[in-house]
Structure formats: C-alpha cells, structure tokens
C-alpha cells in the first residue's frame, strides 16, 4: 500500500452504523491510520443530515481534536484526490453485487485501495452471554426473531437486555449511549420512524433496550442490567458483539438473496449457528428446499429452523370487503428489496376487496422512493427520518381514494400523523414450524456455558 504520509489516510463509506463502529474499535486510537472523512453512501434514503455534520471530538478521540468531517457519497471520487486518500473502507450493507463492485470501481479508479474489514476484527467480547440475531437480507424477520428469543429467555427467568444495531441520524454527541426503559423514551430521544419500528415492540413487551453510537460504552452499561444480552441486528450487517449463539434469519420469499445478490448476507450465513427460514408458510415447498440447499452449501453445520410471521389485526372489520391502502415498514420494502411485508399479507388474509396502488398520489420524498426503488407498487413505505418526510408520508396516505389504511409498520404512526381515514394496525410474531425450535436450540447452547 502506498502511503502519502507516515499514517495511511482512510475514508470510511457508510450510513451511520458499521462505519462508526469500525472507526471506534479499530481506528480511533490507531497511530498507523488517519481517518480523514466519513462518506455517506445512502443519501437517497437518509437525506441531508447524514453528511452535513462532523463526527464529534467526544467520539473521535484525542487523535482527532476537531472531529472528522462528513461528506456526501456523490463526492467520493473527488474527495479521494483532494484529501489524498490511500484507502476507502466500505461499511455498507444490503448491497447487490453490482452495487458493491460499482463502489469498488469508483474507489479504485480514483486512486485509492478498496477495503472490506472483517467484522471479527471489531466484535466486542461481553462478560455476559450474547445471543445475536442477524439476517441475510433486510426485512427477513430479525425483529420478530429477537422478540421470540427474548420471550424464551424471560420464560427461563433470565433478565434480558436487547442492544440494537445503530441508527445514528441525529446529534451524535448526544447519542453515545441511549437507554430505553419505557415507551416515552422514544419521544425523549426524538426517534425516527425507523427507530420507533424497532424499539416500540420490544418496549411494549417490557424488554430493556440500549442503542447509540459507542458500543463499548453501551455494552458496559447493558452488562450491569442483563443476565443475557441479545444483539438485535440491523439490515444484514454482522453483529458488533461476539455471540455465544449466532442466529441468522433468511427469507423464504426471496430465494437467492443469500449471498450472490447482496453483501454481506453470505457473511452472516457462513457464521451462523442457527438459520431461521422465515415466512415459510407463504412460500412454495420447492423454494424452501432450494434455500435450504443454498444455506447448507455455505454452512453445513448450521441448525436450520422453519418459521412463519403470524399476522394479526386490531380491527379486521376495517379490511374485510374494503378498498385499502397499505403502509409498510420502510427499510424492508426500500433498500431491503421486499415486494411487500406484513401489511400486504394482512390485507389479503383479512379479505380486502382491493389493495390500492398509491404511486400516482405520492409526493415529495415518498414519490422519490418509488423512483429509487422500482420494485415497490401497491404499498407506501413508512419513511420519516425528518419532519419533511413525515409530512410527505401523511399527504400521500391522505390523497389515496380508499376506505381505510392498513398500518403494517410496528410503529404507531397515528401518534404523529393526522390521517383522514380509519386505521387498522397490524401485529406479527415469529412462530416456529415443526422441530427443531428456537427454545430447544437456545437452551441447549446456553446450557453448555452454564448460562441457563
């Protein structure tokens, strides 16, 4: 590797998650490297705020007394030249293989080395047992699996603390370590819809939750309150903590998303102790067997469990025989690439007369989401990272000519959107199909380390 100075000059490409963690654990106090920039790789989803700030000094450490500047991804090629960058670390997830190589081509053609750091380099070892829940693709069903794991451990009288993969979109210095003990805390921390979708279902079950930016600090605090820690993963990123049981969720409705089409899905599959094939009740048996074959090729030792997401609705009468518009969990149907999620399943299960196509009614950022993610059709993604996006979401929903709205997102959007139609709210939980099941596997694994 060619160095411009004594220290290798590094730019880190990410979206406010793995990029920050890799910096904190590998680069922050490392005298051999100088991180000269964080570069945002997903402005089309997260908007301006992700790169119009600085990684603050209280997180960057004494080697970076002024913090580290952040830039938009569309400036990466010029930044490499202007900042004399030697190496760019890619810390993105849910990348199709062509997207991964496009970033590599931009970086290599601009004169820097392209680097993918192994997650094993930055995994933190806990003093407490850790069960991790990750996936081969966003929207496979990590959240329901996390809740199922928590329920099992609580049944066995263990105090559970969930630690959620970061979604650090606000003021980073205020997000170093966040503790969520009750629903009101999501308002206290001004959480986005994406954060609320993940946090609220756990909090409703009485599960203590931590999140933030500095996961060594977070782990130290979580260990004070936990018998067992659950790593609640994000996108298809590997865990930040070294797991004692590594559970990875695959999606029976998206055969082939194991590895060839998305990075780092296959990394997770290869590291898994347990692989849950979710939504098996909605898939063809031949597709499920094909996915099992794919998984066994890369990880013949993993235990494979089939499961379904059991969908229920609070007011089925608002769906049966009605024309409805469906609002889905945002990440699942945008960068997750899923054609639909729980809301669409519920609309069909409870007998909607028609699921309306909202695309002609979309405005602002919702309209742009349809342009950026062409696979989306008869649904509205629940995007609300900023107030402007919430307004666009509200206007889009209200403009659809229908009888009622089906909220497939686990976030209670009615708390901060003014909707002009009746609302049916969807809930969904993981249910294993057949044997083995998660309880048998978890008890067996944790018994070996005397943790249950």
Image: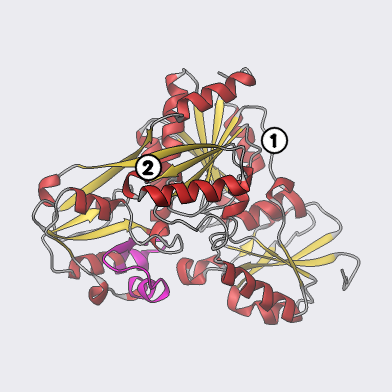
**Which residue is most to the right?**
6
Q: Residue at x 26, y 66 (%)?
A: 378
Q: Residue at x 59, y 36 (%)?
A: 273
In the displayed structure, 437 sits above or below 6; it is above
Residue 5 in picture, x, y percent from top left: 89, 70
Q: Image quadrant for the C terminus? A: top right
The answer, for residue 302, to whether it is visible in the render is yes
Residue at which label 2 appears: 200
From the viewer's perspective, tell me whether residue 117 is left or right of residue 425: right
Q: Residues within 10 Å of mark 1 (few under 14, many from 20)?
A: some
- The picture quadrant where one finds residue 71 is bottom right
Badge 2 marks a residue whose secondary structure is helix
Q: Can you identify the residue that label 1 sits on? A: 125
- The numbered mark, 2 or 1, whose residue comes first in the sequence reads 1
Q: Nearer the viewer, residue 133 or 193?
A: 133
The colour scheme is secondary structure
Quadrant of the image containing the N terminus: bottom right
**Farthest front residue?**
286
Q: Position of residue 340 (x, y in %)?
A: 33, 58
Left or right: where 98 falls relative to 412: right
Point out which mark residue 154 bears.
Answer: none
What is the span of residues highlighted in magenta in the rendered image? 365-392
Spatial separation of the CA atoms under disc 2 and disc 1: 27 Å
């Amino acid at each position: 590797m060619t160095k411009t100075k004594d220290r290798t000059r590094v730019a880190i490409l990410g979206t406010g998650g793995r990029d920050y963690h890799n910096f904190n654990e590998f680069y922050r106090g490392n005298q051999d490297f100088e991180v000269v920039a964080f570069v945002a790789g997903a402005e089309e989803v997260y908007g301006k705020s992700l790169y119009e700030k600085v990684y603050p000094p209280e997180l960057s450490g004494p080697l970076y007394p002024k913090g580290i500047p952040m830039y938009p991804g569309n400036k990466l090629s010029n930044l490499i030249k202007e900042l004399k960058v030697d190496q760019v670390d890619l810390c993105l997830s849910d990348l199709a293989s062509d997207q991964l190589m496009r970033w590599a081509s931009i970086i290599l053609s601009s004169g820097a080395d392209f680097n993918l750091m192994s997650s094993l380099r930055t995994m933190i070892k806990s003093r407490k047992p850790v069960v991790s829940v990750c996936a081969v693709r966003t929207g496979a069903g990590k959240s329901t699996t996390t809740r199922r794991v928590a329920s099992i451990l609580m049944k066995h009288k263990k105090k559970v603390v969930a630690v959620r993969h970061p979604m650090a979109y606000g003021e980073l210095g205020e997000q170093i370590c966040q503790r969520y003990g009750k629903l009101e805390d999501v308002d206290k921390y001004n959480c986005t819809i994406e954060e609320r979708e993940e946090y609220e279902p756990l909090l409703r079950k009485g599960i203590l939750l931590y999140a933030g930016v500095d996961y060594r600090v977070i782990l130290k605090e979580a260990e004070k309150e936990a018998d067992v820690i659950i790593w609640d993963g994000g996108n298809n990123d590997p865990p930040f903590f070294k797991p004692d049981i590594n559970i990875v969720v695959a999606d029976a409705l998206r055969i082939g998303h194991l590895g060839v089409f998305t990075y780092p899905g296959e990394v997770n599959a290869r590291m898994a102790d347990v692989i849950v094939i979710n939504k098996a009740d909605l898939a063809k048996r031949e597709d499920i067997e094909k996915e099992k074959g794919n998984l066994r090729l890369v990880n013949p030792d993993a235990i494979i469990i089939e499961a379904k997401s059991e969908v229920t609705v609070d007011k089925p009468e608002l769906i049966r025989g009605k024309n409805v518009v469906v609002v889905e969990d945002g990440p699942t149907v945008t960068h997750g690439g899923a054609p639909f999620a729980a809301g669409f399943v519920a609309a069909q299960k409870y007998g909607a007369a028609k699921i309306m196509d909202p695309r002609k009614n979309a405005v602002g950022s919702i309209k742009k989401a349809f342009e950026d993610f062409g696979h989306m059709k008869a649904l509205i993604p629940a995007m609300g990272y900023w107030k402007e996006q919430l307004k666009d979401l509200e206007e889009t929903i209200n403009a659809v000519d229908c009888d009622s709205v089906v909220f497939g997102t686990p976030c209670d959007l009615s708390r901060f959107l003014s909707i002009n139609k009746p609302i049916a709210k969807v809930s969904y939980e993981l249910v294993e199909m057949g044997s083995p099941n998660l309880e048998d596997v978890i008890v067996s694994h944790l018994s070996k380390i005397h943790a249950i």
